[in-house]
Every structure is written in C-alpha cells, then in structure tokens.
Image: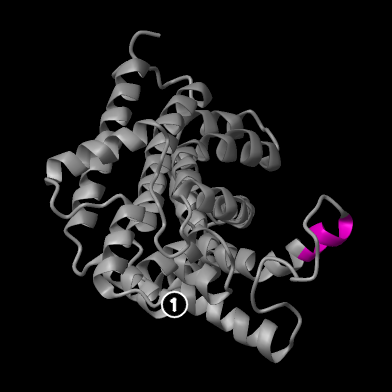
C-alpha cells in the first residue's frame, strides 16, 4: 500500500500528463479553429479575411508561427493561474461558461445518480437475498436492456412521449424564459419541472448497472462466516439483510459512486443536447460542432481532473468505511 501523500502526488502527476496530452491532441486536431471565427467576422463586420484572421488570432492568443513548446508553456502557465482557456464562439473565458453550466449539470446528474444508486442497491440486495424470486430475471433483463440501449434513445423516447405527445413536461430549457431566477417557490418548482425528464433519463439508464453490481457484491458477501454466524444466532432476516449483507456489500460500490460524481462534470452530451438543457454536456456539443477548441480543451480537462480527484478521494474514503483496508503510514 502507498501513503496518502504518494497517492496525492500520483494524482497530481496524472493531471499534469492529462493537461499536456489534451493540449497536444487539440493542437493537432484537423482544421483551423480560427478560420470559422474569422469568416464570422468577415460576414458580420465586413472585414477582409486576412484582417479578420489576424484579429481572431490576437483575441484567441494564438500565433501559428510560435513553436509548439512555447505554446505549451503559455498554456500551462495559464492553467497555474486557474485560466482554462477562451471560447471563440461565446467570446468569454471558459471559466465563465463553466460557472454558468456546471450548476445545472451538477443538479440534474447528482439527483439522478443518487436515485439510480439507491434504487439499484435496494434491487441488487433484494435479488441476491432471494435469488429464485421473480424479481431476479426482471431486474437482470432490465439491466441488459438499458445496457444495450444508448442513453440518447431513452432520452428521445421520453421526449417524444411525455413532452411532445402528452405535453406533460417541457421539451427544452432549464426554466421558463419569463421567470426571474431566485430562491422562491415559483422558480424552484419550475426548475424541477424542466429537469424532470433529464433526471428520469439518467436514472433509468443507471438503475440496472447499480443493481447488477450490488447483486454480485452481495452474493460474494453471503458466503462470509459472519453471515452464517448471524443466521445461526437466529437473527431476523431483515436485520441480517440490512445490517450485515447490505452494509458490507455496498462498500465496493463506493469507489464507483465517487468516480461517477467526478465524471458528472462532463454531463451527457446527447441527453443535454436532446433536451436543450444548458449544462456541461450541451456546451461540449456546441464546442464539438463549431470547432471551438479552446472551450473543448477547457471542458475536457476539467472533466478528467474531476474524475481523477474523485478517484483519489474515493480511495481515502474507502479506508474510512472499511477497517480492513489501511493506507501505509497510518
């Protein structure tokens, strides 16, 4: 086992490597990201292309004649100051875009993740406890179906049925345009109303996976001596199920849950685009479609960094939850 300090150092090194690799990938991406921006200025401002291209390069801080090593140094220097880059299409810093989009993604994905996790854990524990019940093939079949179905298909079906056909829910946006954001009942209820279908899409896609993961973990725990001893002592089945089986089976899932929270910083490109929901995934799709490499680079780096940090924190948390696991030096 390695110490917490070594784990932290490894995580930091991984983030640095990811930052460099991300920069190199973006720098070698096909096409010229400044071309479309320059053409947009030609059409809107009436400038000639060479002037527009020069202005675009100055605004973006990009000089094609500079060496790749120099541009990498400038990029890493900006990262050390907390600057994740500049968006060409929105003409603002990526930090401002993240500050605007991240709360929406964090709200929707965290609620859906917790719902799918706890429902999946309950189902997985139940089918492991009663393996010959009708619930087992039903949950297994549902998990197989959702695993084979892309998340955007589920989102499209919910949108077509509940938003377009039945008109029970709105089809786009985070809240009604006419509302003024604020901590009041009207605004909060409207936000929940708009977020219902995206949350349901995430939840339906995640339940099956958590259920199967919990089932596998619970089945392995059922053969442990303390479960056999609890049954021999005549403890009630409900107490064994909750206090012994579920409590110990859920530990391996903690790491996966923490990593999922880290991954939520990227949102879901397809789900948020389908519902036109202004989260991180929606801005990812805009950056991809319009070749906004500056925004794409910043969003991608944030998502990977959050996942790495979540994995690191999950390792630390796991040692607290499971006394059998210890880090060196403790």
Q: Which of 263 and 80 is in front in this view?
A: 80
- Residue 326, position as x, y percentages in the image: 39, 17
Whether residue 7 can be seen here: yes
- Asked if the stretch drawn in magenta spans residue 186, the answer is yes
What's the magenta bit mostly, secondary-structure-wise?
Answer: helix
- Residue 81, position as x, y percentages in the image: 40, 32
Q: Is the residue marked by circle 1 packed among few (<14), some (14-19), or many (20+) residues within 10 Å?
A: few
Q: Is residue 178 above or below residue 302?
A: below
- Residue located at (56% from left, 51% from top): 102
SS of the residue at dot 1? helix
Residue at the extreme bottom of the image, as rendered: 165
- Residue 150, position as x, y percentages in the image: 43, 74
- Residue located at (67% from left, 66% from top): 174
127 with respect to 212 (left or right): right
Q: Which of 240 and 116 is in front in this view?
A: 116
Magenta stretch bounds: 185-190
- Asked if the stretch drawn in magenta spans residue 210, the answer is no
- Residue 83, position as x, y percentages in the image: 41, 40
Name the residue that disc number 1 marks.
44
Q: In which quarter of the image is the N terminus?
A: top left
Q: Toward which corner of the image does residue 289 lie, by quadrant?
A: bottom left
């Amino acid at each position: 086992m390695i110490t917490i300090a070594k784990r932290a150092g490894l995580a930091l090194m991984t983030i640095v490597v990811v930052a460099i690799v991300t920069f190199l990938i973006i720098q070698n991406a096909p096409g010229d990201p400044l071309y479309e921006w320059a053409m947009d200025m030609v059409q809107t401002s009436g400038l000639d292309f060479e002037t527009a291209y020069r202005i675009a390069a100055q605004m973006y801080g990009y000089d094609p004649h500079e060496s790749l090593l120099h541009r990498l140094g400038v990029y890493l220097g900006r990262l050390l100051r907390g600057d994740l880059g500049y968006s060409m299409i929105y003409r603002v810093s990526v930090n401002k875009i993240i500050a605007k989009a991240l709360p929406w993604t964090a709200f929707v994905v965290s609620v859906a993740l917790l719902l799918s996790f706890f429902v999946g854990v309950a189902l997985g524990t139940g089918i492991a406890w009663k393996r010959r019940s009708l619930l087992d093939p039903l949950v297994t079949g549902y998990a197989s179906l959702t695993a084979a179905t892309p998340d955007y298909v589920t989102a499209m079906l919910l949108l077509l049925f509940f938003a377009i056909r039945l008109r029970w829910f709105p089809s786009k946006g985070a809240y009604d345009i006419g509302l003024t954001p604020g901590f009041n009942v009207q605004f909060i209820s409207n936000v929940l109303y708009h977020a219902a279908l995206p949350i349901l899409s995430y939840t339906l896609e995640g339940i099956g996976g958590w259920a199967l993961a919990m089932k596998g973990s619970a089945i392995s725990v059922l053969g442990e001596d303390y479960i056999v001893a609890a049954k021999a002592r005549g403890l009630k089945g409900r107490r064994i199920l909750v206090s012994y089986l579920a409590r110990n089976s859920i530990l391996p899932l903690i790491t996966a849950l923490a990593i999922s929270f880290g991954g939520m910083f990227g949102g879901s490109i397809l789900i948020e685009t389908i519902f036109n929901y202004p989260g991180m995934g929606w801005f990812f799709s805009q950056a991809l479609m319009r070749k906004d490499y500056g925004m794409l680079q910043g969003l991608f780096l944030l998502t990977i960094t959050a996942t790495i940090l979540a994995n690191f924190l999950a390792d630390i948390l796991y040692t607290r939850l499971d006394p059998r696991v210890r880090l060196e030096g403790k």
